Structures are given as structure tokens and as C-alpha cells.
Image: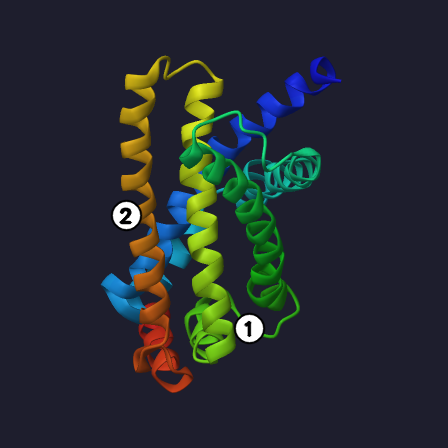
Amino acid sequence: MSGNSYLPRKLHSLLGVIPLGLFFIEHALTNYSAFEGGQQGFVDAVHGIHKLPLVFFIELFIIWLPILFHGVYGLYIAYQSNLNTGRFSYGRNWAFALQRISGVITLIFVFWHVWNTRVQVALGNTTYEQLGSHMHEIVNQPVYFAIYFIAVIAAVFHFSNGLWSFLVSWGITVGPRAQRVSSNICIGIFVIVSVLFLLSLFAFRGAEFAPSAAAAAISTATFG
């Protein structure tokens, strides 16, 4: 059984870092443009992404299919895992358990977030240019804001802790000292990326992203 799962687990680990980890960082930076550049900066960032050539195929093969495999196989791993394995130190046991729990939370959140954003664009209920004001309406509802807050922290933990596990399982960090160093780096990544996402959430709550203000900014971005 373990022999049959070796390659899928390796692929699952690899996809979590490349390309999904790179996309995750890009998404954090795109959202952070809402905090740094306001409505105008966010519209410009969204326009920049969707002007990429062959963007549909880029997203299909670099984002959606890897997410599908990583998410579905990750659920299988979580189902098969014993959260009290005792394989690691006390702290690593907690990280092992939280990695599985955060993965389930993240997968559910991704589908919910995609439904609220990309699917609504596809249905014609909003546009890419109006995503800022659309997010404003979502995160100004206390329950939804709490969901986003918790899910963002879970997703960033899953990525940063998964990066540590990737470095170990692929033989990049060998030995206790290298693993301690990589652990500190991953903690730093967790803090930085969490701050980027949380600042963007608070930015979307601001008055600048209210529908009336957003319409004026979109007009400037489009015709200015």
C-alpha cells in the first residue's frame, strides 16, 4: 500500500509548492494591492492578471487541475492519517494534526470563495472590475468576515507548514539543524503572508470599496 502511494504523495507534495504555492503568494500580493493601492491599485492588478496570454489554459493547468488533485488526494491522506501517530516531537505532532485539519478547512473555503467570486463573474452577477466592491459587500457581513479570517489563517498555515514538510520529504533539508532553520523560515513566511491577506481583508471593508466609490474608480481605470 505504501509503495502504491509513494508517487501520488510526492506529486501531492510537489503541487502544493509548485505551482500552487507560487499561485498562493501571487494571490496574496494581488489582494494586498487593495491595501497598498486602494480600489485603483486592485483593479489594475486584476486587469494585469487577466490580460495574460492564454490565461484560461494557464489557470486550468497551473491552478484548477493542481488544486483538484491536491485537494482530493489531500482529503484521502487526511482520512487515512492517525493524528496521534507519535512519529514526531510534541510540536511536530500538533503541526501534523493541524496540517490535515487546515487542509480540509482550506479546501472547503476555496470552493466557497470561488463560488462567491469567479462563479459569480461567470454567471454575470459581477465583473472582474467589480470584484473589489463585491468583496466589500461580503466581508462587511460579520459572519462572512469571521469565516474569511479563520480560513485565511488556516490556508496560510497549511501552505507554510506544507512547505516545511516538502523540504524534508524531498531531501532538501537533511538533519535537525537544517530543519530548524527551515522551520524558522516557514514561520516567517506564515507571518508575512498572513499579514498580506489580513491587511487586504481590512482594506476591502473600507469605504473606498463601497459600490458607489468603486464605480468611479473603475471608470477612471477603464477610460482614464
User: Is the residue under label 2 in contact with that under label 1 (CB below 8 Å)?
Assistant: no
Relative side of 48 to 199, left or right: right
Where is residue 31, by image quadrant?
bottom left
Q: Label 2 neighbourhood size at 10 Å, few (<14), some (14-19), many (20+)?
A: few
The image shows residue 41 at horizontal and vertical percentages of 29, 63
The image shows residue 193 at horizontal and vertical percentages of 33, 48
Where is residue 58, by image quadrant?
top right
Distance between mark 1 and mark 2 Cα atoms: 30 Å
Q: Nearer the viewer, mark 1 or mark 2?
A: 2
Relative side of 6 to 45, left or right: right
Residue 192 is labelled as 2
The residue where tag 1 is placed is: 126
Judging depth in this view, the residue of 66 and 89 nearest the camera is 89
The image shows residue 131 at horizontal and vertical percentages of 46, 69
Query: SS at mark 1?
Result: loop
Judging depth in this view, the residue of 46 and 142 nearest the camera is 142
Q: Quadrant of the C terminus?
A: bottom left
Q: Label 1 neighbourhood size at 10 Å, few (<14), some (14-19), many (20+)?
A: some
The image shows residue 56 at horizontal and vertical percentages of 58, 46
Q: Mark 1 or mark 2: which comes first in sequence?
A: 1
Determine if residue 171 is in view: yes
The amino acid beneath tag 2 is: Ile
Residue at x-position 59% and y-position 59%: 114
Relative side of 175 to 124, left or right: left
Vertical side of 83 occupied by 46: above or below: below
The amino acid beneath tag 1 is: Thr
Query: SS at mark 2?
Result: helix
Vertical side of 185 occupied by 114: above or below: below
Determine if residue 51 is in view: no
Residue 180 is labelled as none
Q: Quadrant of the N terminus?
A: top right
